[in-house]
Image: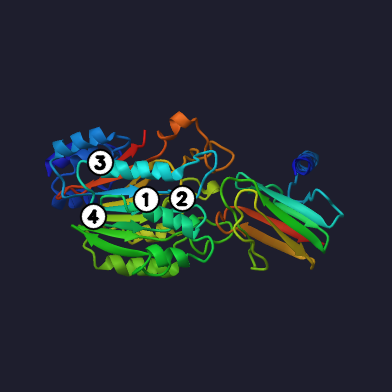
Amino acid sequence: MRPLFFVVACSMFLFAASGPSRAQTQSAKTGSDSSTITIDNFTFDAQTVTVKAGTQVTWINHDDVPHKVVSTEKKFSSPVLDTDGRFSYTFTAPGTYEYFCSIHPTMKGRVIVR
Amino acid sequence: MGKYIVHDHNDDGLDRRGFLKCMAWAGTGIVWTAAGGLFTSKTLGALTRDRLAAGAGPFTFVQISDSHIGFSKEANKDVVATLREAVNRINALPSRPDFVIHTGDLTHLSKPGEFDTLDQVLKEMKTDHVFFVPGEHDVLEDDGAQYLERHGKNTLGHGWYSFDHRGVHFIGLVNVVDLRAGGLGLLGREQLEWLERDVKRVKSSTPVVVFAHIPLWTIYPQWGWGTDDSAQALSYLKRFGSVTVLNGHIHQVLQKVEGRVTFHTAMSTAFPQPAPGTAPGPGPMNVPADQLRRLLGLRTVDYVQNRQALAVIDSTLA
């Protein structure tokens, strides 16, 4: 998975460098049917991800402590993700989906489905 | 009363009238006040000397925290061994503690085998009773049902309770359940209402010890190191002459005095975490093997009758 992280990191960097807002970070594979969000240092690497309807989003935990990805509106909930644990959810309907880590609730993220 | 004023020279934010009123019954406590109320990082040898100097106190209890049984990453690959070392330290104390308080994160992943291992190690401890409050790692799967079944019998709600021991009122609170997106630790309305009722029957002159996993003061909200509604809880304790708050969660000793309330976070027995804001995140901190035990430890608390403040002594496993 390392190359993918690199792509994600680079795309974040480029986006941050190219505009004043970091709110609309595109997923690494814009236009495809899957997207990955990694967790490092108690942070979702892309705090806002925009995807097409039907996209499967996968969260991967790289921390030494467990995290749990939970929809703020209870639309989805991962099991406890220990180190390297992953959870996927397919977003079928357009909308904005807020989520957080129910173990460490200062960790928040958002998936925008178009 | 004059002698109290003579010693009341440190700028500790105490309201003098309240302080004198408080000390009128307490009789002493000057050493505590003059020293700023913080006794830290003493060795167990020093503890023994202090004990002899002060005369034997009526009772001692111990706080351990964040044993994280089940954790096996780089920061400490054998958390059972370090917990056992802490237990051995407790068993070697000059006087047997009346009880031990574990302030949460007993386990790392709330797994039955982790709870079993913890129980086995704690059975080796020479004390009469162990009190628990849950950490967020103990309530991962089932809103804490397993925790309650094992360690929360005869408690209320998600595991809160109070008890009295030799003139001190102890309150165990739970601030790791039903957390809200973007928030910190949370006590919740039901528990706060219970707390308000619970302390109503306690005299203001009774020393109070409050223990909970996540700190009840805001240390570093960016890392979730605080409790959203702790101010409400503390407001019910304002009339008491001595309130000692014991927390875990942040795997390091930090202390603060606010009026008549002293706050103390404890070391973990498992792994250290970085000082607030000194790392990209609050996760386990990797240190050289020969330094690990300098950052793990336990806490002894001495209560001396007729002396209002409790002496809090942290010691490492080194």
Residue drawn where x is 79% and y is 56% of the image: A50
Residue B213 image position (x, y, % from top left): 42, 54
| Comes first in the chain, label 4 or label 2 | 2
Asked if the residue at tag 3 contacts the one at tag 4, i.e. Cβ–Cβ closer than 8 Å, the answer is: no
Amino acid type at image mark 2: Ile
Amino acid type at image mark 3: Ala
Q: Which residue is mark 4?
A: B207
Instruction: Tell which tag, 1 or 4, sits nearer the viewer.
Output: 1
Nearest the eye: B221 or A51: A51
Q: What distance separates the C-alpha of mark 1 from that of mark 2? A: 10 Å
Mark drawn on residue B92: 3
Residue B55 image position (x, y, % from top left): 12, 41
Q: What distance separates the C-alpha of mark 2 from that of mark 3? A: 23 Å
Residue B156 image position (x, y, % from top left): 37, 69
Q: Is residue A10 above or below residue B122?
A: above
Residue B245 image position (x, y, % from top left): 34, 51
| Comes first in the chain, label 2 or label 3 | 2
| Comes first in the chain, label 1 or label 2 | 2
Q: What distance separates the C-alpha of mark 4 from that of mark 3? A: 27 Å
Please tell me how crowded label 1 is: few (under 14), some (14-19), or many (20+) other residues with Cα within 10 Å.
Answer: some
Asked if the residue at tag 2 contacts the one at tag 1, i.e. Cβ–Cβ closer than 8 Å, the answer is: yes
Please tell me how crowded label 4 is: few (under 14), some (14-19), or many (20+) other residues with Cα within 10 Å.
Answer: many
Quadrant location of residue B203?
bottom left
Q: Which residue is mark 1?
A: B121
Instruction: Tell which tag, 1 or 2, sits nearer the viewer.
Output: 1
Please tell me how crowded label 3 is: few (under 14), some (14-19), or many (20+) other residues with Cα within 10 Å.
Answer: few
Instruction: Tell which tag, 4 or 2, sits nearer the viewer.
Output: 2
Amino acid type at image mark 1: Val
Whether residue B246 is visible, yes or no, is yes
- Badge 1 and badge 2 in a common chain: yes
Q: Which residue is mark 2?
A: B69
Instruction: Tell which tag, 3 or 1, sits nearer the viewer.
Output: 1
